[in-house]
Image: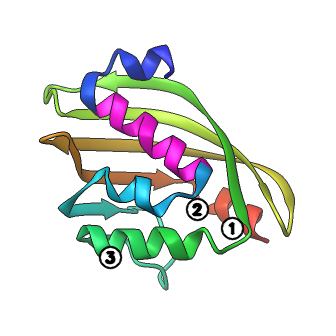
Amino acid sequence: MSEELRSLGEPGRLLERVRAASIKQSVSEMARLYAVDAVHEFPFTKPDVASRLAGRDTILEFIAAGWKGPLKYERYQTVSAYTTNDPDTIVVQQDVYGASSTTGPFLLPNLVVLTVSNGEIQRFRDFVNILAALEAIG
């Protein structure tokens, strides 16, 4: 686990597990991280893509469908990481490195605001750079 995420307590540990599950493309590992009533949001997205996913099953279905696309995550780099006034919420700026079967290597910058409750992800706000994602997809 990266030192930056370790310093963020339980939310940082959960984000590290999200990263590992994403690299492995493991739906079963991802399922163990989200609360049943979790919410995953994409505040910056295209009009034809869902910006709010409610419930673990809906979130996992979306994630699994995305993994069938051309992008394969290979590693994450923490750019900056912060605690908030709420000890269950963190803010992490990160870069995702990977390969696209259509365009080759990519760098996908994003910002995550993660809130946990009872050892599970309750809310995941994913401010992904939509232009970089579209370019990587081709």
Residue drawn at point x = 54 percent, y = 77 percent: 65
Queried whether the magenta region covers residue 16, the answer comes back as yes
Residue drawn at point x = 53 percent, y = 42 percent: 20
- Overall secondary structure of the magenta stretch? helix
Residue 45: percent from left, percent from top: 48, 69
Q: Earlier in the sequence, mark 3 or mark 1?
A: 3
- Residue 130 is labelled as 2
Colour scheme employed for the rendering of this structure: rainbow
* Inter-mark Cα distance, 2 to 3: 21 Å
Q: Callout 1: few (<14), some (14-19), or many (20+) C-alpha neighbours within 10 Å? A: few
Residue 110: percent from left, percent from top: 53, 45
Queried whether the magenta region covers residue 96, the answer comes back as no
Residue 98: percent from left, percent from top: 74, 48
Badge nearest the viewer, 2 or 3: 3
Secondary structure under the numbered disc 2 in the rendered image:
helix
Image marks 1 and 2: residues in contact by CB distance under 8 Å = yes
* Inter-mark Cα distance, 1 to 2: 6 Å
- Residue 134 is labelled as 1
Q: What segment carries the magenta color?
A: 11-23
Say what amino acid the circle numbered 3 marks: Thr
Residue hosting label 3: 58
Say what amino acid the circle numbered 1 marks: Leu
Q: Of 21 and 78, which appears nearest the observer? A: 21
Q: Of 98 and 93, which appears nearest the observer? A: 98
Task: Please state if 75 lies on the left or on the right of 45 as rendered.
Answer: right
The image shows residue 102, relative to residue 6, as above or below, that is: below
Q: Callout 2: few (<14), some (14-19), or many (20+) C-alpha neighbours within 10 Å? A: some
Secondary structure under the numbered disc 1 in the rendered image:
helix
